[in-house]
Structure formats: C-alpha cells, structure tokens
Image (cartoon, grey):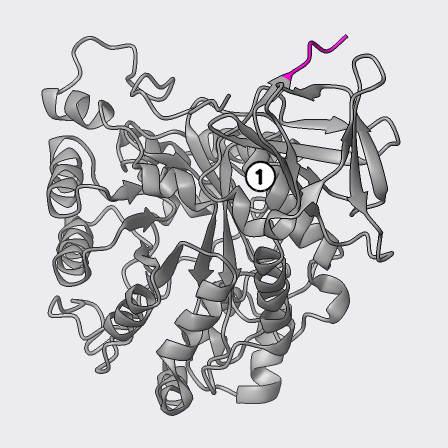
Amino acid sequence: MSTDHGIDGRRSGAGTRSRKQPSLLRQLRRRTVPTWWQDAKLGIFIHWTLASVPGFATVPAEQHSPLVHVPNQPLAAQYTEWYLNSLRFPASEASRYHREHYGDRPYESFVDEFTAGLAHWNPTAWAEQFARTGARYVVMVTKHHDGYCPWPTSVPNPRRANWFSERDIVGELADAVRAAGMRFGLYYSGGIDWTFEDRPISTFADLVAAVPSDPEYGDYAEAQVRELIERYEPSVLWNDIAWPFGGDRLWQLFSDYYAAVPDGVVNDRWMPRGAAFNIVRTRPGRAFVDRLAVRSSSKGRTVPPQPPHFDVRTPEYSSFDTVQRYQWETCRGMDRSFGYNRMSGPEHFMTRSDLLGSFVDIVAKGGNLLLNVGPRGEDSAIPDEQAQRLTWLAEWSAAGGHVLSGTRPWVFQEGTSREGHHLRYAARDEAVHVAVLDGPAGYLTLTDVDLAATGVAVGPGGRPLTTDRSQRDLLRVDLGPSDGDNSWPFVFTLTSAVARPRR
C-alpha cells in the first residue's frame, strides 16, 4: 500500500499557528503539490553562467556546507558560480588564478567568450540527453548572483546597462525541453544580485547583509520574475537565498504565478527580507547569525529556513534520513560545485554507486533528486565527466530503474536482507519495488515483506522471478546470476505485497 505524503498546508514555518494570517496566504497554504512533481523523482538543474568561462573554484578535501566560514576567505569558494565574490578577496585562490590567466580583465569581459561559445550550443541535443536519464523536469538558472540574464529581458537593470543576452537562451532551451517530453522550470537569484549590492561575502552574516534593501531592487526582481512567468510559463519557480520583500505583495506574486501555471511549484527559498535582516548591522547580531550558521552546518545538512509559503523543501548537497510531511528535493552537483569547475578531478565526482545509490535512497524517503549539470562557458559543452554520469542514469533507467517514477514511500523505506544486502523500498498502489543497492547476488531473503496469495515477483523487463515461501516468515527471491558488478542497484517488483511486522 502506498503512502502519499503531500503538503496539506499545515506547516511549522513562520506564522503557521496564527489565526490572523492574511486570507491570500491562507489560500496559498491550501494547495497540494501537483502529482506530476511527486511522480517525477529526477530533475536536471543547469548552472551555466558567465563564471563558466573561467570555470574555477577551490576544491575542498570533501564536500561541506557552503555556510562553513574560513577566516579572511570568501564564502562558498567551492562553487564556481561564486567566482565574482571570490575575486573581492585579493588573497583568494580565485584571485590568484584570475591574475595569472586574465590579468586585470574585469568579470564583465567574460560575456564575449560566453556569447561566442553559443555558436556550438545545441539545445535539442541537451534536452534529448537529459530525457534519456529518466528526468521529468529541467530547471535552468536564469539569473544567478552576478545578475547576468540569459534572455533578452525587457526589464533594464538600472545599475548595469545591457546586462543580458540578445539571444533567447532560456526560450530555446524551454522549447527543446518540452519537445523532449519534460517540464521546464527556472531558477532566479532573488536574494543576491551583485550589480545592486557588491559587498564581499565571507560569513553567513555577510550573506544576510548582502540581500539588497533598496526598493528599486525589489521592483526590478519582481518585474523580471513576472516577465519570466509570462514568457516561459515555468512549471517550477525556484528562487534562491531570499526575496527582497514580503507580505501581500509576495503572496500576490505567488497567486498570479499559480493562476498562470495552475500545476506550478515554488521552492522554499523565498524568505522575505524584513526587519529581522537588520540584525546583521550590529556586532552581536552578526555573531549570533554566524553561530546559527555554524550550528546548521555542523549537523551535516544545509536546509533553508522555512518561509511563510512554499511547495517543496530543498536541502543542498544533503538529504533527509526519513520520510517528511512535506515534499522535498535534494539539489546538488556531480562534483563539489554546481557550475563547471576545471579544477575537479575524477576523484571529486560521484561514483556510479554513490550516484545511483543516493538517488534510490532519496526516492525511498519521498524526495526528488535535482541533479546539476554545469556546462563549460567557452564552448557550451557538457564536460565528459558529467556526460558519463548522465549516461549511467540513462543506462540504469533503461535497465529497470524507471519503475521508481510515480512511486511513494512504503511502510518501510529501507531494510536489510538476511544475507546482508542493503535494500530500499518504494510503492505504487499494491506493488512494492525493491532496490538492492549492492547489486544482484543470486538470491536474497526478505524478512519484512511477503506476498499475498496472488502476488508474484517480477524483474526488469517483466522477467518472472522465482520465489520460495517454504520457511516461516521469510520470502526468498531468486534474482538470477550476478555479473559481479555491485555498483548497479537492481530493482525488482513484488505485486500484492504485504508488510510483515518488524521485531
């Protein structure tokens, strides 16, 4: 039996217990997350910015929260899309790299290389490559923190003239993605725009302080998002960091978006900029905010604070250990950066077992994986290391992994066979899909699931699997011969499955 953990509007976020909520906000909270999103399981994120031209970031020994502060060093230095911020620190590795390769060239000069690289771009080939992975939606960065817009916006940036692409990169990719049978979403950095607020960001308190307070920015950001909604009707509206205003004005923006895209989805990074943001203007306030960031990062999970309204939660480079009462998606790169990082070596990328195993685990806990692709800036190519991982997903999906689409968390999300195989469960109606994370191994014995009288076990491609229930409270399933490769999760299906009580 499947369990649908949809959003019911009763969240523990800011203001949820108040009976004096604005009526528009109450209406927003009555929405449930659209079925298409819950069914999708896999999405593709695209970070393709001007910073993709230098494509440089420090590579930490292991992935850590971007909130981790290194004294006198830029925040999030492991993310190439933060390259411009890193250049504000003369002693940073990015500054040394920039001086060595580009001299005193300004960041703005990367527009020429980025634009020239578009001559090699084939959005149809990208979309077809993404679709083969089994992804159901694609989310593209339309404005990152550098403020550059990859579409011919009619909303001029009052601080930097012509800071946009004359070619409609967003529109071309939207058409290609939809033609390939996927939904198209967009990312917008509403909380940070370095053309409006260019202070160096070294700590989390600096990040909070960098959210523009200028009303002109709020007008600009809202006008651009409204333009994006009108032009491209995105199925996902994915904001980052914060939003420059709140109240009825923000709720109206959401309401208008849902009116334009009734089955649209918004994420959880719309924290309104309010008086609380001013806490970082005092030394005690900055210290308090930074302590909160340290406490959050020490738990090994980067999860945005809950804003008054959202549809899905978005932990970054981390996931939840259990089923949540709200919908969620893990967003992450294939290496330790979202944008393309030429400094990443093979050892910095996810292995096949890490990629497929973490994806299966996320699905079992009720989440989606929003896996990032970071194309190069100079030639618009998806680097080989990333293309290989897209191929792994495509091969696994074609070999049976696709059955996890449309599932919901089962009674149990994970388990272990009697032989020690690590298992994950996901359900659709009365069928339970069992993923063996360490690959097929001849047979396995299940202790927490049984078959009803009419139930059968089915392998990839509908191949019948032999079962044995002769031992009390045990279900033995013959998976067939092993090929010796345990980095490939093997998924089989039990129809009319029944959960056994765990002792």
294 to 337, vertically: above or below: above
Q: How many marks?
A: 1
Nearer the observer, 353 or 429: 429
Q: Does the rendering let one see residue 429? A: yes
Question: Residue 389, located in which quarter of the rendered image?
Answer: bottom right
Residue type at tag 1: Ile
Nearer the observer, 268 or 290: 268
384 to 329, vertically: above or below: below
Which residue is at 80% across, 39% downward?
478
Q: Position of residue 56 (x, y in %)?
A: 58, 73
Which quarter shows the C terminus?
top right
Which residue is at 48% across, 80% downward?
53
Nearer the observer, 65 or 361: 361
36 to 412, vertically: above or below: below
Q: Position of residue 416 (x, y in %)?
A: 78, 28
Q: Residues within 10 Å of mark 1 (few under 14, many from 20)?
A: many
Q: Does the rendering let one see residue 334? A: no
Q: Assign a secondary structure to mark 1.
A: helix
For residue 218, side relative to residue 142 (left or right): left
For residue 354, side relative to residue 409 (left or right): right
Q: Is residue 295 magenta?
A: no
Look at the image and give the residue range highlighted in magenta: 499-503
Question: Residue 273, located in which quarter of the rendered image?
Answer: top left
Overall secondary structure of the magenta stretch?
loop
Q: Position of residue 415 (x, y in %)?
A: 73, 26
**Which residue has dot 1 on it?**
362
For residue 368, side relative to residue 295 (left or right): left
Question: Residue 23, located in which quarter of the rendered image?
Answer: top left
